[in-house]
Image: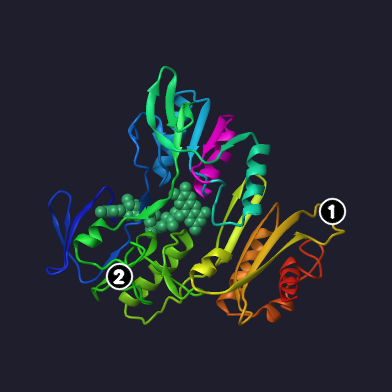
Amino acid sequence: VRLHTRVAAVKPGAQTLVLAGGETVPFDYLVVATGAGPRLPKVPGLDVEGVFTLRNVSDALRIKRFIQDRRVRRAVAVGAGYISLEMCEAFRTLGLETTILESEARPVMRLPEDFSAKIVEEIQANGVTFTPRVRLEGFDRSPSGIFVHTGNGPVEADIVLIATGVAPEVKLAAEAGIALGGTGAIAVNDHQQTNLPFVYAAGDCCEGYHRVSRKPVYIPLGDTANKQGRVAGANIGGQDVTFPGIVGSQCFKVFGLEVASTGLTEEEARQAGLTPVSATIQGVSRAHSYPGTKRLWLKLVADTGTGRLLGAQAVGAEGVVARINILAGALAGGLSLEEIAYLDLAYAPPFSGAWDPVHIAAQQLLK
Ligand SMILES: Cc1cc2nc3c(=O)[nH]c(=O)nc-3n(C[C@H](O)[C@H](O)[C@H](O)COP(=O)(O)OP(=O)(O)OC[C@H]3O[C@@H](n4cnc5c(N)ncnc54)[C@H](O)[C@@H]3O)c2cc1C
């Protein structure tokens, strides 16, 4: 492993890499795993001291050192996706006054509206100011910190985190003639092979095949990156391994709330040309009578014609990820609502009711 070594170019014809220092490195096979970078807003002042993005552990340590050294009191996060929400929890844990500025009407826009509202309730209950529909205009130094200029006037901060999404890091690949897909990430087949047979790609720089929409998608996540990397390596090593694709499962925690989803949302199902129906239930994490049981909300989306499950989203204080993982399995297996409604799930009162929220939601949608 050669650390602090940047690859400046790939020469597919010669099967060599050119390093930033000019050194040439030959290869028989190449795996492109260049990851993703922050998608930055096109505004002035991104280089103002105290304005950060977060991609890796080094960034996290830089942010932590800045907070300690500069006695930071006021944090502003731009964007209200999962990275911003997780960071706001960290800022509040450190005792910082914390504000989220979001251009849309609500956080995590792909979630159902009432689920986003629960996230807003949770962050506000934990002292975060949430400001929706903000037009970001740029950053400037202020006498005591940073001005975040917005359409509604400036907001003052000591530290700013920009978390407005990520984009695949594909410059190296594109310049080498490695084909990109419609999402802008590197296109790969089910062996993680690119259009150049001796070049593979894995992780945040490449697309994944969505098993529900049956389309290539860009959902950059760590567990997918691991699996794609293993498949690429196994195939280069002489095995014949196929990556079946993803169902788009994801989760995060913000303060006392678990948030998770798998498959398609109702809107995504429509965009994929399907005709979805949905049902949302309020359930409980353990048996009703069991001490400490918590409320959770689960939405199921299914295809009107076939009754096939298309996706699920859930929020709640406990047991949310466990339910979504069951439904991720159901999606991968192509289960119908009838099958899910009577699925043999493990039951004991500390973990669920005899009828789990998964069963109840499926029965509800069948009505
Ligand atoms: C704050 C945060 C929280 C996250 N939380 C989760 C989570 O809870 N669950 C989850 O599933 N995912 C999570 N993710 C996403 C997850 O981290 C990524 O999906 C995963 O790291 C992707 O792995 P990768 O190897 O493809 O890319 P990376 O981990 O980004 O690695 C790419 C590497 O390539 C290097 N590189 C790029 N270009 C060159 C070049 N030209 N020459 C040499 N080296 C180069 C980069 O420096 C980098 O080290 C999170 C991401 C962030 C930022």
Residue at 55%, 44% in the rendered image: 85
Looking at the rendered structure, the kind of residue marked 1 is Pro
Q: Position of residue 312 (x, y in %)?
A: 62, 66
Q: Position of residue 66 (x, y in %)?
A: 43, 29
The secondary structure type at the circle numbered 2 is strand
Residue at 40%, 52% in the rendered image: 166
Residue at 30%, 75% in the rendered image: 236
The magenta span reads 82-104
Compared across the picture, whether 32 is left or right of 340 comes to left
Q: How many marks?
A: 2
Q: Position of residue 51 (x, y in %)?
A: 40, 33
Magenta region includes residue 249: no
Residue at 60%, 50% in the rendered image: 253
Identify the colour scheme used: rainbow
Residue 367 in the image: above or below residue 40: below
Residue 51 in the image: above or below residue 16: above
Which quadrant, please, contains the N terminus? bottom left
Task: Return the residue found at the far right.
Answer: 289
Which quadrant, please, contains the C terminus? bottom right
| Distance in Å between CA atoms under marks 1 and 2 | 51 Å
Residue 169 in the image: above or below residue 144: below
Q: Which residue is mark 2?
A: 200
> Which quarter of the frame holds ligand 1?
bottom left
CB-based contact (under 8 Å), mark 1 and mark 2:
no
Magenta region includes residue 96: yes
Q: Which residue is mark 1?
A: 291
Tell me: is circle 1 under 8 Å from ligand 1. no
Compared across the picture, whether 161 is left or right of 180 comes to right
- In the figure, residue 63 lies in which quadrant? top left
Compared across the picture, whether 226 is left or right of 332 comes to left
